[in-house]
Image (tube, rainbow, N blue to C red):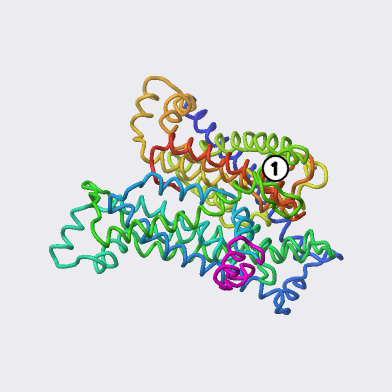
Amino acid sequence: MTKSRKADLWSGVSVVIVLLFLLFLIYPLFNIFKEAMVDKTGQISFAQFTRFFADPYYTQTILNSLKVTVLVTLGCVLIGLPFSYFYSFYDLKGTKFLFVASLLCCMSAPFIGAYAWILLLGRSGVITTALSSLFNIEVGSIYGFKGILLVQVMKFYPLVLIYMNGAFRNIDNSLMEASANLGCTGVRRFFKVVLTLSMPTLLAAALLVFMRAFADFGTPLLIGEGYRTFTVEIYNQYMGENGTDHGFAAAISIIAVLVTTLIFLLQKYATSKFNFSMNALHPVEKKRPHGLSGFLMHLYCYLVVAVAMLPQLYVVYLSFRKCKGGVFKPGFSLDSYATAMNKYLGRSIKNTLLFGVLALAVIIVVSIFIAYLVVRRAGVVSNVIDTTAMLPYVIPGAVVGIALIISFNVEPISIVGTLWIMVLALVIRRMPYTIRSATATLMAIPMNIEEASISLGTSKLKTLIKVTVPMMANGIKSGAILSWVAIITEISSGIILYNNKNITLTVATYVQIVRGNYGVACAFAAVLTVFTIISMVIYLKVSKDEDVKL
């Protein structure tokens, strides 16, 4: 009887989670399909898709997104891979600074980097003007394809660095020594041994960069100008000033989801070709770099970090400059912060914290149950739950925002315009971080510890709460903090769902940029940067590791 009740408990948990996913994830996605494929007469129609593929203006948006995203992914690998190799295999000076600075660049909101690069390399940017007046050098426009490429590569290369650090540390030194004994050293050993052994991780890092860059909304919107991407086109079709077409926006959303899903499956297939496990019993010892090679390693790493950090630092600097509208003037003041306080800075901070805490509470609870079901009660239902939970990983934020508006704008669940729609979007978008971290941690916890607790008469649920969850604490905290940082920098879904009552720091920053209030925008961005730094410091204290598991 007791065993039956225990079985019923976890079956009940599975049912509840499945129902939640059906209501808040599958149902909204179904409504996106319905919006795109059902015409005004209620008949199934492919007219919206025909319109998309028949007009080169629209098909070019997907091609543009693929083009820039593929090159961004390649650029991040080309920059991040050698950076990580130098960082992992050599004892560089200031390694902690290099890692923390790179992590900060990765965690900040992407569109803030785009905005800062406009101020630096725009038509009237400080670097553009200085090079032109002092050296008669014209650097060209930051806007368009080249600008998106620059901003996203500098933003996302740390993802490759962070992932590959963990992979390189798992390489056993005996393999390196064996390859050296066989005459395979230097660059040849890197490609033949090191890169081959770490290929699954490299593919995972490349996929994450691809997904982040492909779904990025703020960067192409601010800096793209004539270079149109699908995320901006979805926004324009759904909320454009020159008229909206919700059905067509839904059709573009479906196409975007299909493209990202295809890329995800291709990555999974490629990873399956490198199906092996590796554990470093004798980790590689870092060498101290010497001579010219050591100088070049340090120069490369610090130069990359300096370029990536420049926009962040420049925005904070400008937040203290005198500014009138969109023009910065000589001298310093706190006027931008004072104006920001009158333009819902306080409300934005309160909303960011409130939405973040509520979303994170839901994420942590649901992630613990999902991780337990996946690891301890593996089966068809658990696999379905795990797969469904990762769907937001391949769904752009703009698509999530539109799906929620379509689904929850009428009774019985009418939450559009309330804080709950914002919280729901954040939970959907950012739950995968904590789920993956909690799952990875639970896999490393021996089952016999829980069995010992149960054999002493403790129920499975109480064992989960009193024994398992405390042992999972570090993994849960690490994933939760990563989710938190992603929550406070969320823009893609927020820009579609917000109103003045539920505006957040990221959305408020974007609104001020669009309105040309550059000083105020810098103040908002600086506050957001401080939030990000605090979150990052907490993450490093909690995780005590340089691996990010996702």
Nearest the viewer among 302 and 448 is: 302
Compared across the picture, whether 145 is left or right of 84 comes to: right
Q: Is residue 523 magenta?
A: no
Question: Could you classify mark 1 by the number of other residues whose Cα lies within 10 Å: few (under 14), some (14-19), or many (20 or more)?
Answer: many
Nearest the viewer among 541 and 432 is: 541
Residue 403 seen = no
Q: In the figure, residue 305 lies in which quadrant?
A: bottom left
Magenta residues, as a range?
A: 123-146
Nearest the viewer among 416 and 101 is: 101
Name the secondary structure under disc 1. loop
Q: Where is residue 75 in the image (x, y as percent from the top left)?
A: 47, 66
Q: In the figure, residue 524 lies in which quadrant?
A: top right
Q: Which residue ends up furthest to the right in the rendered image?
A: 41
Q: Which amino acid does label 1 sit on?
A: Thr
Q: Position of residue 249 (x, y in %)?
A: 74, 63
463 lies above or below 163: above
Q: Position of residue 230 (x, y in %)?
A: 67, 66
The residue under the point 59% across, 55% down is: 113
Residue 547 seen = yes
Compared across the picture, whether 103 is left or right of 355 comes to: left
Q: Which residue ends up furthest to the top in the rendered image?
A: 457
406 lies above or below 145: above
Nearest the viewer among 164 and 450 is: 164
Q: Position of residue 398 (x, y in %)?
A: 68, 56
Q: Which residue ends up furthest to the left in the rendered image?
A: 181
Q: Is residue 142 magenta?
A: yes
Mark count:
1
What residue sits right under mark 1 in the picture? 504
